[in-house]
Amino acid sequence: MVDQSSGRFYYLCFPSKGEKEKRCVPIRDMAAIWDATKALQFLRERNVNIMERSSCDILSNAIRESIQAYNSFYQPIANGVALSKEVLLEKPNIAHSAMMILACAGAMRLSLLDNSLDSIPPIEKLTRGILSSQLPNGSFLPEFIGSEDDVYREIEFIPGEAMVALMEIHDLSTNMDGLISSETRKDIMSSMMKAFEYYSGYYYERDVGINYNIWQIQAFAKLHSSLSLQSPENSDKLSSIRSYVLDLCDDIIDSKAWKHELS
């Protein structure tokens, strides 16, 4: 899946045909970087053999090269930044910022960004950019600026991706001093508590697709873990979050698509 000439990921590969395709789709490219960090972590944890180490080196280089390709293109958003249209070739939204944060977080967990980039990605400012898109009711605007009606656009994907990124960087900053400020850490938790009220209410009051559940589970399971460490006395809130996550899981198990895969 890695183009040896550029060190970047291919968009599509067809092994049976021996075909590979390059295409500029940044949101999927950044998601692939995040996935690659997960694969690399899996391999490292299992003391890979010499042949697999070669694959690890290829993945490591592709992760660094791909992050660097986006790392010089930002535009100001409120009191933060977002990736610019120049590199995205489309209007930036909070999902782009989320995937950049997740890709960088995965790389940092593997110590792949230490002195290997021209500059370290502005994690704090990307995080502040996402936080700035939250409305008073707890929902997130997909494209940073808009009306309350805009929060429903791609609600099954974009806000969930953003919230997973917020919690991932919050968790990582626990053991990585200076990654984000203490104020931003507090603001992430405050933001996520407001988001919980909105998105859990949306789930119980409306019909949503399974893709909604997938991202919400990841985001609020992380919130539950963090809150249980910071405020274990807040049992009622923890119980509400836990019930919500379990209900989302039950929906996936009961879905026709899931049952079809099992059969």
Image: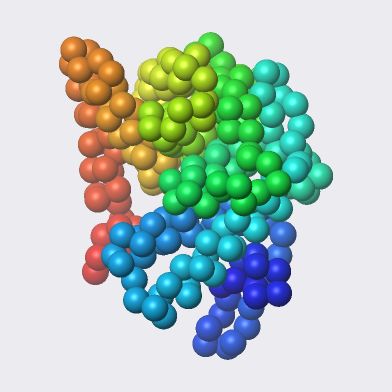
* Residue 53 picture location, percent across and down: 43, 72
Instruction: State how many labels appear.
Output: 0
Eyeballing the image, is 99 above or below 190?
Answer: below
Quadrant (top left, top right, bottom left, bottom right) of the C terminus:
bottom left
* Residue 19 picture location, percent across and down: 63, 83
* Residue 48 sits in quarter: bottom left
Quadrant (top left, top right, bottom left, bottom right) of the N terminus:
bottom right
Query: In this image, 248 relative to 38: left or right?
Result: left
Q: State the residue in front, 208 or 145.
A: 145
Does residue 191 appear in the picture of this structure? no
* Residue 155 picture location, percent across and down: 52, 35
Does residue 122 appear in the picture of this structure? yes
* Residue 242 sits in quarter: top left
Eyeballing the image, is 123 above or below 85?
Answer: above
Residue at horizontal 47 percent and vertical 17 percent from the top: 182
Residue at horizontal 56 percent and vertical 80 percent from the top: 14
Query: In this image, 43 relative to 116: left or right?
Result: left
> Which residue is farthest bottom?
17
Residue at horizontal 53 percent and vertical 61 percent from the top: 60
Q: State the residue in front, 143 or 108.
A: 108
Colouring rule applied to residues: rainbow
Eyeballing the image, is 60 above or below 183?
Answer: below
Q: State the residue in front, 216 or 182.
A: 182
Residue at horizontal 76 percent and vertical 41 percent from the top: 73
> Which residue is farthest front?
115
Query: In this image, 28 relative to 83: left or right?
Result: left
Eyeballing the image, is 55 above or below 257?
Answer: below
* Residue 146 picture location, percent across and down: 69, 22
* Residue 218 sits in quarter: top left
